Image (tube, helix red, strand yellow):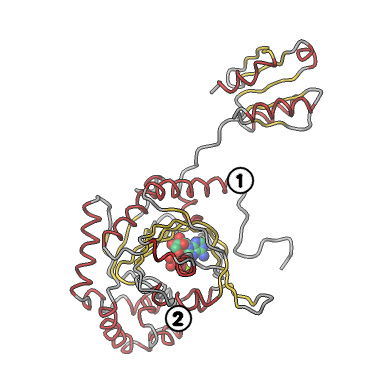
Amino acid sequence: MSALQPVRGTHDLLPDEARRHRAIEAAAFACAGRAGFGEIATPIFEFTEVFARTLGETSDVVTKEMYSFTDRSGDSITLRPEGTAGVARAFLSGGLAQHLPLKLFYRGPMFRHERPQKGRLRQFHQIGVELLGVDNPLGDVEVLALAWRILSDLGLGAKVRLEINTLGDAPSRAAYRETLLAFLSGHIDQLSQESRQRMERNPLRVLDSKDEGDKRVVANAPLIHDSLTPEARDFFAAVTNGLEALGIPFEVNPRLVRGLDYYSHTAFEFTTTALGAQGTVLAGGRYDGLIGMMGGPPTPGIGWAAGVERLAMLIDEPPMPPRPVAVVPMGDGLLGLKIAESLRAAGVSVDMAFSGNLKKRMARAAKLNARFAVLLGEEELARGHVSLRDLDAATQTEVPLDGLVERLAQAE
Ligand code: ATP
Ligand code: MG
């Protein structure tokens, strides 16, 4: 450990990378706004119970990945590993139940103590949405359509695949639990230690195991589809019909499950083959049990979250900010700064270097892809003029200082 290194699994977002993150957030924000989703920002830490109770005691996140600590008041606090539990907590503590249905969008850092690798960090960022108070399967379709629109706007329509499944309602899952447990018990000697331990408490969790031996067993496990109640079957059919009607491509993956306990009915993932093992870029599902589980009134919900770092590796270079004007003072730097400020006040992007000879400053202007350079030569200034250099055309004209702002504010 060295105090001057970033903590393992964290990274700095330098301007180029930050620009990619902003582009993703901006696309998500615009699409979510058009669909009526308002922004919510919950704290990045909560009482540990908020996550421990909801994500499931046997989930990977709770058993292995939470950043928990005791604060100076003796409270157990956890840095949020995901967004939904905090939103549900805010829904309850903020008395938002009177405002249903609620459409919420969030973005921000999440924290999980995982083994860092490409696309897997200990501090990463998510964008996500939640739709609360809608038990209609068209709610699932709308939330999926929003995900699809954001990914399409980011140019990723052809790079991702939507896989969808149902986890059924409570009676379907109770029936499936028995069937699955009987199957897993018959293969117990082939299962990992961890899966054996989790099996009794939550056999569904074994389906999501990343252990190779577990995966081989699970490949032949019975499917939840055979345990579905007619209601759960109809619900799923309504979701897939809706997707077809909207022309959103998807595949039913009967083996898809989600790692957290609060899901029911619809579960889905957008995956890509372009990122190796970390191929899931966006994932979510319906969580009708969550708010009741937290002690609130039974409130249906559906949502998803996407990993911004994974999306950032997939998108094309986002558009550059407007090209700046370079102000190049030859003598009086303060006059240069005054001119720069009056241009900025008029909406022009301006760069001004504080030192260096003319050659160095022109090289910097070229590096910044400046459109014009304003050269403040003493002799021209004495006549109330400056030199305006068009860096694309490589031409230079003298213009009166008092007309400069107007001239550049109109230039493209
Ligand atoms: P995985 O199977 O990759 O561990 P997960 O099921 O734990 O994913 P979710 O909890 O569904 O992931 O989070 C939603 C999305 O957030 C993921 O699809 C992924 O894009 C992103 N994500 C999750 N964990 C990380 C991480 N440690 N680093 C970077 N992105 C992550
Ligand atoms: Mg994970």
Q: Residue at x 60, y 21 (%)?
A: 408
Ranked by sequence position, the earlier of labels 1 and 2 is 1
- The outermost residue toward the right is 331
Foreground of the two, 151 or 343: 343
- The amino acid type of the residue labelled 1 equals Pro
Amino acid of disc 2: Thr
Q: Quadrant of residue 395?
A: top right
At 19% from the left and 68% from the top, the residue drawn is: 234
Q: Which residue is under mark 2?
A: 58
Tell me the residue at 38%/62% (across/down): 303
Query: In which quarter of the view is residue 112 placed?
Result: bottom right
Q: Which residue is mark 1?
A: 15
Quadrant of the rendered image containing residue 11 = bottom right
Instruction: Tell me how far mark 1 sits from mark 2, CA to CA.
Output: 39 Å
Label 1 secondary element: helix
**From the image, which quarter does the N terminus lie in?**
bottom right
User: Residue 54 location, x and y as percent?
Assistant: 45, 75
Q: Are marks 1 and 2 in contact (CB under 8 Å)?
A: no
Relative vertical location of residue 384 with respect to residue 249 in this rendering, above or below: above
Q: Is residue 255 left or right of residue 384?
A: left
Q: Position of residue 224 (x, y in %)?
A: 26, 76
Residue 268: which disc? none
Q: Residue at x 25, y 83 (%)?
A: 175
Kind of element beneath mark 2: loop
Q: Position of residue 160 (x, y in %)?
A: 36, 53
**Mark 2, other Cα within 10 Å: few <14 / some 14–19 / many ≥20:** many
